[in-house]
Image: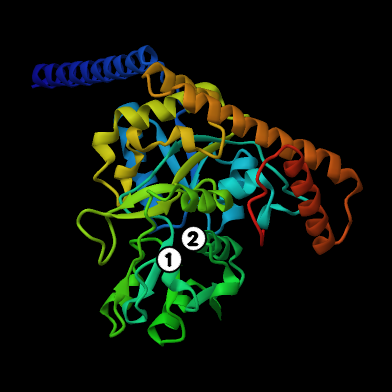
Amino acid sequence: MLSRLYSSSLWSRSFLLNSMVALLLNLTASNLSSAAEGIDLPKTIAWSAYPTGTGGYSQAVAIGSILQRQYRVNLRVIPGRNDVSRLATLRANRVHFSAGGSEAVYAQEGILNFASKIWGPQPIRALMSNYSDSCSFTFATASDANINSVADIKGKRVTFVQGAPSLNNATAALLSYANLTWDDVTAVEVGGYNASIDAVLNNRADVVGGACNSPPFLRIEASPRGLTFPALPHDNPEAVARVRSRLPWYVPHIAYEGPTLPEEGLEVFSSAYPLLVGMDTSEETMVYSMVKIMHQHFDEYKDNAPGATGWLLERQKFDQAFLPFHPGAIRYYKEIGAWNAAADAQNLLNLNRQRVLMDAWAAFFPTAPEGYAEFEAAWMRARNSALEAEGLITLGEGL
């Protein structure tokens, strides 16, 4: 009896030892493989993202599962309820990267919420962009308003969202496609995005702006008024240039995903969402590793979250970017032959723009007015003067 117990004990210890050895060998092999690929990440990395339930958050979770399964790296996704909170954690080094939207551009520019004393222009660096099968912002119109082109919006009722300058500026940019301004339409003031949908449903407005696949648009489609998306054809270079002079990070795009969109897609404009960014101080190897993993494992996460297919390498639009890319990202894109002379030229222009903005802030700040409103107004004047002196666009009116 004692002999059998002793033998059983020896077998258990032997089995446990062999299991531990196998685990260590697997871990070593995984680490060697990662090292061989040039991938080097800490055990835990963190992203800020839009709140839970959004496409950006879901995509971050899907990418996190790849990191955990393939590299034993934990990705903590920190939801941020607004533009400032998502980038505040990045600037404070509480997260490594931020998966957001146009706020990265506004932070680079030092405008809107980033025109305050505690912000100013930020040295944001892009890693990777998501251009999904939907679009980030376009016009949705009530079908009974008979709007079939942007030109047809003249004289119509267009929602103006209080406290949302980024939305209203995007509306102004798309109106400029047809050489229209807010003076050519009837602005209908609403208290928020959902209120703008209600304004169309209640026949107080005819036009609202939003993402092509925005769920509230389904309410307009199902209503007696119906839903129509007017196209913004890309074969009109002057019209495209007008839009991009106000929103240079909006690029010509084909949208397939959204109610009433035709099977062949619709010509619109779009910006990256999510846009994965870091700072100029982000560690280069970490950036290189993150971009490499997201590219190499694309097929494994592309169907695991809504819109994740937009991370496809061929959709990166390097030569139309408005933010400079991080050297770690550029190193990987060059390594796989995706970075060309046009991308490099655009990146140099973007770096120069950031330099002009940062220099303008450094010259302005020491003698800036104390009051919040006075400070912002004076900064906008100084900013615009610095950009105009270098022949750079100021991003239009209303910012």
The amino acid type found where label 1 is placed reads Val
In the shown orientation, is residue 120 left or right of residue 370?
left
Callout 2: few (<14), some (14-19), or many (20+) C-alpha neighbours within 10 Å? many
Residue located beneath label 1 in the image: 150
Residue located beneath label 2 in the image: 174
In the rendered image, the quadrant that contains the C terminus is bottom right
Q: Quadrant of residue 5?
A: top left
Q: Nearer the viewer, residue 25 or 179?
A: 179
- Residue at (34% x, 77% y) in the render: 146
Does 397 appear above or below 343?
below
In the shown orientation, is residue 117 left or right of residue 300?
right
Does 19 appear above or below 379?
above
Does 9 appear above or below 130?
above
- Residue at (57% x, 61% y) in the render: 169
Estimate the x, y position of residue 322 in percent, counting from the top left. 55, 40
In the rendered image, the quadrant that contains the N terminus is top left
Estimate the x, y position of residue 316 in percent, counting from the top left. 40, 36
Secondary structure found at label 1 = helix
Q: Nearer the viewer, residue 156 or 383?
A: 156
Residue 286 makes an appearance in the image: no
Q: How is the image coloured?
A: rainbow
Callout 1: few (<14), some (14-19), or many (20+) C-alpha neighbours within 10 Å? many
- Residue at (58% x, 30% y) in the render: 282
The amino acid type found where label 2 is placed reads Leu
- Residue at (70% x, 43% y) in the render: 121
Q: Quadrant of residue 3?
A: top left
